[in-house]
């Protein structure tokens, strides 16, 4: 009596699988193409390089995945990463003892406050996420420039560069941190009630509220989480430069949003996955690396990212119009 | 017919600014019956349902539910006491699966309490069982609700309302957006609810439907109760006259 229903279920699951694999197949094709055309691509040095370079933006994108599934986004993540870099590095330089721990704690505290402010504006005051996070992005970046006079400050103890440049068993430590955060947040998003509610609020906030879900609390938490991820990225940046970098994280927000969308999430909310985001990050990363290896100017990279984003959204539209 | 009142509304008034939406309304819902609530647009039907379900609060008068005075300030309180509402928009989340919608806000959790890990397997199995109670054709449990037909969505919304130990189910225009076959299926489900011991209040504009499924009909007009009739003892013409005010005009007591 349920065969028709089961078949329908099976075919829609199959479609879902193809859709999910679709984007992974694009990444696979890119990697195969690069391996076939550039010997240099497959070298350990280059692969480690790709993994390391994309780890930081990858961490930012993990947080962004939650914000986009929620039906919003966070434009302030780049500025928040820079805030972590500046606050953390300055504490590490100035504080005498326990300076790494204090620096990390200070950076987290500063960034989580910004995240809480975003969350408060969006969840409780009902400011549009675009306006709220554009505002905090501008304010935070401005305050950083005022405080630092827009100049980097060097002098973080070099032992901290282990975090940004070190390797364990040949794997860059930022990549390990990225994998750890991606696994943890992937679990939270797809296995726990909190993640389930992020999808529910993103899909239909009114219904979620009618069903007794505390929509404001979910929204607030997601923006704090996005800021936490940006803070982790900024702290790893300290580990790569041993300095406070007011210009750090410029454009992170757009790259992260692009990666999440390429990974199959919808800007309308309610759809997306952590796995998709990771694939999205590496599609952008491999294209960028490929352009490099082919000797194309770095200035072309945003052009490529933009076109990939438009193509991803365009293809998504196409598949939706069919239904 | 001896019946027991599950919900009684006593002299309720509700204003929206200067507009009086409900004026001194008194009515009852009998346990184990399907009660129809009819009236023209703006008669106050939806407002009354929102008062019973805790979405709105009355400006005057009292509600008694299951023999106890009821003062619901939130829909969650009404739901916790066993009053479920199926709204016109069904309150379904299209991007989420059937089981996720049925369990929305009441997810089953497994493992250590603080981790709040979803017990998907249990929710899927129980949803299948739950929907099987109400429908011959169980929609695909793991498909997103967006992929389902209007009738299937209505079924899910009703099954969800009936699933949680509720006693009274309020439905606002349950078949307004459905085709003939789907309307029939949903009406079957509503009758099934009565057989399972639920009390049901149905708002409907479709008088034929009201006569097909209800045991008792209450008529509202311009925020006032015009009267009640036992369905099998009345006739659509009489109800129409009550809805439009023709009856009052004939008997000379204009409101």
Image (spheres, grey):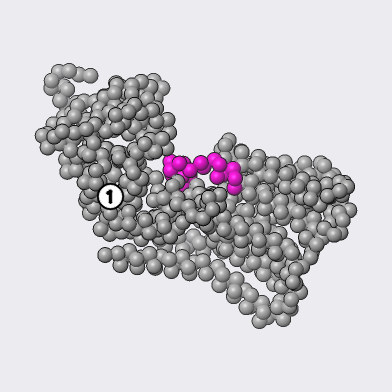
**Figure quadrant of residue B164:** top left
- Stretch of the chain drawn in magenta: A204-222
Quadrant occupied by the C terminus of chain A = bottom left
Percent coordinates x, y for residue A141 in the rendering:
75, 45
Percent coordinates x, y for residue A182 in the rendering:
63, 60
Report the side of B128 relative to B211 (left or right). right
Q: Residue at x 30, y 67 (%)?
A: A3
Report the side of A94 relative to B148 (left or right). right
**Figure quadrant of residue A136:** top right
Percent coordinates x, y for residue A143 in the rendering:
77, 41
Q: Residue at x 62, y 46 (%)?
A: A223
What is the secondary structure assignment of the residue under circle 1? loop
| Residue pointed to by mark 1 | B178
Query: Of residues B74 and B114, which is closer to you in this image?
Result: B114
Report the side of A225 relative to A322 (left or right). right
Looking at the image, can residue B159 be seen? yes
As for residue A216 lying within the magenta part, the answer is yes
């Amino acid at each position: 009596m349920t065969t028709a229903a089961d078949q329908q279920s099976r075919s829609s699951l199959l479609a879902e699988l193809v859709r999910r694999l679709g984007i992974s197949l694009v990444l696979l094709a890119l990697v195969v193409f690069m391996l076939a055309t550039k010997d240099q691509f497959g070298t350990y040095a280059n692969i480690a390089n790709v993994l390391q370079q994309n780890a930081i933006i990858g961490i930012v994108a993990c947080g962004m995945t939650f914000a986009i599934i929620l039906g919003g986004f966070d434009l302030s993540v780049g500025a928040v990463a820079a805030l972590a870099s500046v606050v953390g590095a300055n504490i590490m330089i100035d504080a005498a003892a326990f300076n790494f721990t204090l620096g990390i704690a200070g950076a987290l505290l500063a960034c989580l406050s910004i995240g809480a402010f975003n969350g408060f504006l969006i969840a409780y005051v009902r400011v549009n996420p675009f306006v709220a996070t554009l505002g905090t992005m501008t304010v935070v970046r401005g305050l950083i420039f005022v405080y630092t006079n827009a100049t980097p400050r060097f002098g973080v103890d070099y032992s901290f560069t282990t975090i940004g440049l070190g390797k364990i068993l040949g794997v860059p430590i930022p990549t390990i941190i990225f994998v750890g955060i991606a696994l943890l947040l992937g679990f939270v998003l797809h296995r726990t009630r909190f993640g389930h509610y992020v999808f529910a609020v993103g899909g239909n906030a009114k219904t979620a509220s009618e069903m007794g879900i505390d929509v404001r609390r979910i929204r607030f938490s997601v923006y704090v989480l996005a800021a936490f991820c940006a803070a982790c990225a900024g702290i790893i940046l300290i580990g790569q430069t041993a300095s406070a970098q007011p210009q750090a994280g410029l454009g992170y927000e757009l790259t992260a949003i692009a990666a999440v969308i390429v990974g199959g999430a919808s800007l309308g909310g309610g759809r997306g996955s952590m796995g998709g985001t990771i694939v999205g990050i590496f599609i952008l990363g491999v294209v960028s690396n490929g352009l490099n290896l082919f000797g194309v100017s770095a200035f072309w990279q945003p052009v490529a990212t933009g076109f990939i984003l438009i193509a991803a959204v365009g293809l998504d539209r196409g598949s939706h119009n069919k239904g | 017919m001896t019946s027991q009142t599950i919900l009684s509304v006593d002299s309720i008034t509700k204003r929206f600014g200067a507009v009086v939406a409900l004026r001194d309304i008194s009515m009852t819902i009998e346990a184990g019956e399907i009660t129809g609530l009819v009236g023209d647009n703006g008669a106050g039907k939806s407002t009354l349902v929102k008062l019973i379900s805790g979405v709105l609060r009355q400006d005057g008068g009292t509600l008694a539910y299951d023999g106890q005075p009821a003062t619901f300030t939130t829909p969650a309180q009404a739901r916790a006491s066993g009053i479920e509402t199926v709204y016109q928009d069904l309150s379904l989340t299209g991007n989420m699966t059937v089981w996720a919608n049925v369990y929305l806000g009441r997810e089953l959790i497994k493992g250590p309490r603080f981790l709040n890990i979803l017990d998907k397997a249990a929710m899927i199995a129980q949803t299948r069982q739950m929907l099987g109670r109400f429908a011959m054709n169980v929609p695909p449990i793991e498909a997103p609700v967006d992929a389902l037909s209007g009738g299937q969505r209505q079924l899910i919304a009703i099954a969800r309302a009936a699933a949680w130990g509720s006693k009274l189910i309020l439905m606002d225009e349950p078949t307004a957006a459905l085709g003939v076959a789907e309307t029939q299926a949903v009406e079957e489900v509503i009758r099934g609810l009565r057989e399972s011991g639920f009390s049901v209040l149905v708002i409907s504009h479709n008088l034929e439907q009201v006569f097909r499924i209800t045991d008792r009909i209450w008529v509202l007009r311009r925020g006032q109760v015009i009267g009640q009739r036992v369905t099998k003892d009345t006739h659509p013409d009489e109800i129409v006259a009550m809805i439009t005010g023709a009856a009052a005009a004939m008997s000379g007591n204009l409101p």
